[in-house]
Amino acid sequence: MKMHDRLQENNQDTERFGQILPERPRYFLRPIMERLIRFGTMPVDQQETLEDLGKKGIVIYCLKYKSKFDLLYLKTRLFQMGLPHPQFAFDTRIYGFHPFWKAWKLRFKHLAHYLRRSSLPNPYEEGFYEGQVKSSNTGIMFLVGEKGYHQRAIMFGEDPIQHLLDLQKSLDRPIFLVPCAVLYSRHPGRESPVPHLKWLSGENTGSVRKLISFVRGYRHAVIEIGDPVNLQDVLPELSSVSSERRAQIFQIRRELINSIDRIHRAIVGPALKSKLELKEIILNNPRLQTYMRRRAKSTGQEIWKIRKEADTYLEEIAADYNYTLVKLMSRLLTWVWNNMFEGIEVDKESLKKVKKAAREHTIVYIPSHKSHLDYLILSYILFQNNLHPPFIAAGKNLAFWPLGPIFRRGGAFFIRRTFRGQRFYAEVFSSYVKTMVHLGHNIEFFIEGGRSRTGKLILPKLGLLSILIQAVEEGYCDDLIFVPTAICYDRIPEEEAYVHEVTGGAKTSENVKQLLGLRRFLKRRYGRVYVRFAKPISLVQYLERNKLDMKSMRPRERHAMYRDFSFRIINSINQVSLVTPHSLVSSSLLTTSRSGIQRSSVERAAGILYEYLKFTGVRFARTFSNYSVMLEDTLADLEKSKIIERIRDQDDEAEEELISIEEKKRHTLEYYKNNIIHFFLPASFVATSLLAQRTFEPNKFAVIEDYKTLKHLFKYEFAYDADVSDEKQVERVFNFFLETSWLKAKVGNHANYLLSHEGLEACRAFSSLIANYLEGYRVCLRSLRMLDKKEQYLDKDFVKKILAEGRKALKLGLIERPEAVSKIMYQNAMRYLEERKIIAKKVEHEKDYMKPPKEYFIKGAEFNEGQNLLKIIDKFLGRNVVP
């Protein structure tokens, strides 16, 4: 009988092969199972991919191991979601999915066929699969299995992929092989303390164990797909030589299996070592052992005492990951976020890139750090989006009971604030981090060191970053992928505490009392949270691109490399940060130094800033889609929070609304302004220079020089984009000013421009954004007079003195902006003055090496240069005389 005739005949009796999947399979407890299966998730972008593939061609799902339970789950969940779902299966007879009598009828038919012909019906030879594929039905195959292995590898028999390639030759529509992973638990697996429970773990388990795993974890069940293989694209590359073709098909199969393994890795993570096993691995680290022997020799202690000390450090540091707690915390945090926020928005496009990287590499997440909530939000987002939560480097200040044990079980490992005078601790900590990376665990740490009290990113700390880079250099892993992450808030719960610290108040240590006080934060709403990921950065690619060889680097070169890499991370976070309504409105309110501002002035300033942000191409929160409503809602929220007061004349509706800002509340607005100040810096520097020239015909070359001066002056305040030159930044701002007609080019003169009156107003708005920094640095320079009266001041005492000078200057009108009185700004300014040798530090070491040395400020070699710097700042502030 010809193939065409067989195909026609078999299309009339396709069910006789036992490989047709009913639309809704029949089985015991189906209604209950279907309800539980409905909890399963699949990323929206992958659902869209499947819909698209179903329209373009024929979808064949590929599961790694043969499992009828996985087949049932996948079939049911895809059907529930309205996606292409398997209608037939390769090399699998599915009696149990049919009605009872029909299933037994099929069994008897197959038995009779076997007795007559010594074989079962062959769906390959008899055209069953050909008929299904040509009817564009969705199928499923299993990539690994004993029967399939013997058939393919030993006997060179039928192979589903080979068969599909043969069919593809006669089809116009492509066949897509879609690697698919089905997981009912995200537990990474570890040595079980209860031996008889070990049989529940494992990737390739039987249906009963799959069912138990599903019932225990159905709420967290997940389906994910990898990159599909288009057989139409494979055909031209397929060899005509049978042995070579088999090798090519083997490679296709391996790629599909590897794709599934990568999905599994990203979701579940590597298997966990028991705590004891992990500690033993670290204590036997060759480098750490060498250090311990040297330490024992130099101190005269027995080696076991040194090892015991190392073990004590490991107990202090190590995480104790518990998947059950992570699941419970996920449910609890869902309730917390629903009470605190209007929603958490994640940029799905950037998340897709992270997922792709996580399937192949060890990931280091580096988020911005504005709130204690950052620890929880990022892990929550990753867990909700089927990515294994990382191990988090948390400050030792959070290790107090009961939060410490909870954080440890959530994946936190603890780090001391400083390693100064603690070389042994530093070696143990370094070995712990490198071992975790070697085992394939993802890491999260805050490159800023601590939470930003000012709203802008803190300049990077290099300690933990250098350890991770050394891990690659020393061969603990082939590469690390760094993922800078911006976590942006409309409002943060800690804003009052931050204002208290910035204005000179003492930091309140984290403790149980603070923990009990968290309930009050659940009584109010803080708007939305926005999470965006920057483009993942490969360390190896960074080194290759910059032609850097770590092994040949001298210490100074190595430090420069660490610094450059860290600033690239900070810049990446800045670039993907979102402009929120509160950040724009706060910036607009602070364009005046007065305590009152008219509503129309706020709207004009907001319009100027908004237009510039649009020009630069930054991302906005979606509430900006209705700009006027956004503006009104944000002002209403600030009024409700008593940050501003809106004064309206009830008797005269024509009278314009006045917005009043208390002196203390300006610091709160300053925090939110600083969330986006990095976007405005080029325009602010240019505008400040244009105003300082005091002419309507400013010179561009003078602007470039002033730009460089301001950039250098604030090098400890802001992180700049190293890939864009100063000249290019000035050029971009000038282009914007020309587009808006705030500047006009003078005919026949490429250096001088004409500044319009509208341009003057815009310059004042942009310049005002850095005016408080100029005033703050001015206060520091004027405070240096104290060193004429007293030779040295303890560093902390000197900053307190400057704060007192700042408050005094504000009352006397020597500075106009209360936000210029800032402890953190003064500390940064002193670092800059120390670098310029205007001041210097004298260090006195304590007898107890564990105690930090005392540091004193004294006059530097270039102390008199302070007066010249003061004149430059006065020029930018528009002052002629130094008071």
Image (cartoon, grey):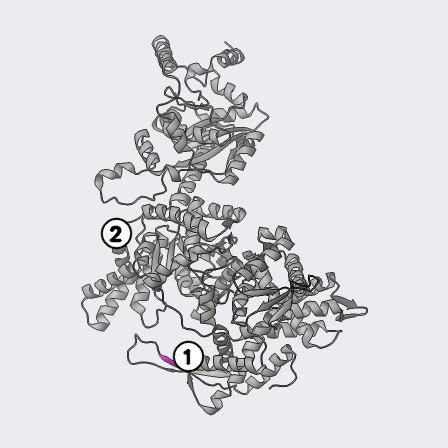
Q: Is residue 425 left or right of residue 855?
A: left
- x, y percent for residue 126: 46, 15
- Name the residue at the right extreme: 747
Image coordinates for residue 713, horizontal then vertical, percent: 56, 75
Residue kind at label 2, given as amino acid type: Glu
Q: Which quadrant of the view contains residue 634?
A: bottom right
The residue that mark 1 highlights is 796
Q: 241 or 202: nearer the eye?
A: 202
User: x, y (%) of residue 610?
Assistant: 64, 59
Q: Can residue 144 be seen by looking at this rendering?
A: no
Q: Position of residue 604 (x, y in %)?
A: 68, 63
Q: Is residue 480 above or below residue 217?
A: below
Q: Nearer the viewer, residue 639 or 323?
A: 639
Q: Which mark is residue 277?
A: 2
If you read the primary sequence from the N terminus, does the residue marked by circle 2 or circle 1 appear first? 2
Which span is picked out in magenta?
A: 850-861
Q: Secondary structure at mark 2?
A: helix
Of helix, strand and loop, which one carries label 1? helix
Q: Is residue 292 magenta?
A: no
At 35% across and 72% down in the image, what residue appears? 420
- Which of discs 2 and 1 lies nearer the camera? The answer is 1
As shown in the figure, which amino acid type bears the numbered disc 1? Answer: Lys
| Badge 2 density bin: few <14, some 14–19, many ≥20, Cα 10 Å | few
- The crowding category of the residue bearing disc 1, from other C-alpha atoms within 10 Å (few below 14, some 14 to 19, many at least 20), is few
Disc 2 to disc 1, C-alpha distance = 45 Å
